Image (spheres, grey):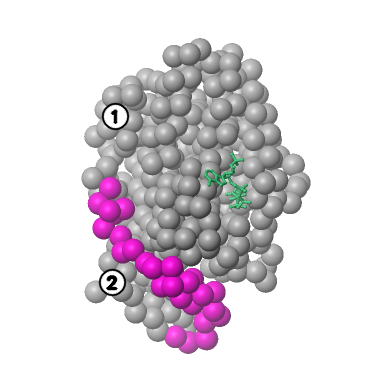
Amino acid sequence: MKIGIDRIGFATTNKYLDLDELANARGVDPNKFKIGIGQNKMAVADMTEDIVTLAINSTLEYLDDVDLAKLGLLIVGTESGIDQSKSASLFVKEALNLPNEIRTFEVKEACFGATAGLMMARDYVRAHPNHTAIVIGSDIARYGLNTSGEVTQGAGAVSMFIAQEPKIIAFEEGHASYSEDINDFWRPNNFKTALVDGKYSTEIYLKFFQKTFDAYLNQNKLTADDFTAITYHLPFTKMGLKANRLAVAEASEDSKARLEENFEYSTKYGREVGNLYTGSLYLSFLSLLENAGANLQAGKRIGFFSYGSGAMGEFFAGELVSGYEQYLNKELHQQMLSERTKLSVAEYENVFTETLKDLPEDIELSSDVTAGKYYFAGQNGFARNYKIKK
Ligand code: CAA
């Protein structure tokens, strides 16, 4: 039975910061951010946007195509959760009017959370072939003003509908996983911004890529030449570029050129929004699908490298399904990115600082955000409210 991604939706914030302007404000050569780190812009979330609103808005993109009677599972992967106990997925389920009979919960393992959800959904659909699942990776990456990680912040969600006989990509059997207990990135309970040892995290990411890629190739008797493209978790695009260099090291000249060209297509959206943490790998996949054009043929194999600090890595792959192009929303996504409001560095700093404040027990918020349908409307007795924009 073929199981995979049947639909895919994406949401980000409608505010962004141009990283040339951030470089100038921080006294850094703009080429360091654009070329050295590989990022152009980053999405900035305001007080009325959180992982729940992003998750809802990304799923609304395709929900009309889902037969709710067959939906059995909803998983939200995140590492920027809004409650220490209650799952974000319950807020999402309610806003989307999903059936009360589904199983729903939140998963955490840094940026690996959505992949953990995806693998659970794949196994769930295999065990219950008449049922389907929704898996969402939703995050807001915050490192702090004037930190070295500042340029690698971002926000957004990718939502995937998982079913048998999928319309976009069917996963191959198997996967290669690797984990170790290390401290490359973490966020203690009393911190609103992440702590990161950026250079160490790059070293571990590359080590985990090599281990899981080699294991997957051995397991399935493949070489790099057997892939039309490999997509990566992209906290910043340079990190994936370094892994892709490892991937093509022993490939033929033709394969090397193809994998390098397709890697560039997979980075286009990530360069514009920054790190989505759990959603990042799946945004790379979406970016590849919507930008590679004739470079991507149905029936070809695409690799996925998922990495979550702490650390957990996994490599898996799938085959593009004939007619996949018909199920994409390229124009909508490109419009979403081009119609965002640009913030000055001072405006970004104000929005950012405001989002770090503790909210009072009771507060009502209004939103000036034009993108997406839902916003975070405040809280009563510290219980969060989500509303539809007027
Ligand atoms: N022109 C072109 N390139 C330039 C340049 C210029 N003028 N100036 C510098 N560069 C290059 C450097 O040569 C370097 O390139 P290489 O990496 O190829 O050597 C690159 O720009 C960065 O320079 P530095 O290493 O000096 O930059 P830095 O000290 O400011 O750190 C960083 C950069 C490590 C990426 C830092 O921004 C950071 O820590 N970011 C966060 C790291 C991160 O996201 N880790 C992710 C872990 S995975 C994840 O997403 C987390 C998870 O699971 C939760």
Residue shown at 48%/19% (left/top)?
A: 256
Residue shown at 43%/56% (left/top)?
A: 20
Answer whether residue 52 is visible to the viewer in this image: no
Side of 149 relative to 168 (left or right): right
Residue 332 image offset from top left, x and y in percent: 25, 49
Residue 199 image offset from top left, x and y in percent: 67, 46
Q: Residue tagged by mark 1?
A: 293
Side of 304 relative to 328 (left or right): right
For label 1, being within 8 Å of ligand 1 is answered no
Residue shown at 32%/35% (left/top)?
A: 291
Side of 194 relative to 27 (left or right): right
Residue shown at 46%/80% (left/top)?
A: 379
Side of 156 relative to 249 (left or right): left
Element under label 2?
Answer: loop
- Vertical arrangement, residue 71 with respect to residue 225, above or below: below
Q: Residue furthest right?
A: 181
Marks 1 and 2, how far apart in space? 35 Å
For the image shown, how many numbered marks are present on the structure? 2
Q: Which residues, given as a range, are shown in magenta?
A: 334-363
Element under label 1?
Answer: helix
Q: Residue tagged by mark 2?
A: 389
Answer whether residue 323 is visible to the viewer in this image: yes
Q: Earlier in the sequence, mark 1 or mark 2?
A: 1
Q: Amino acid at mark 2?
A: Lys
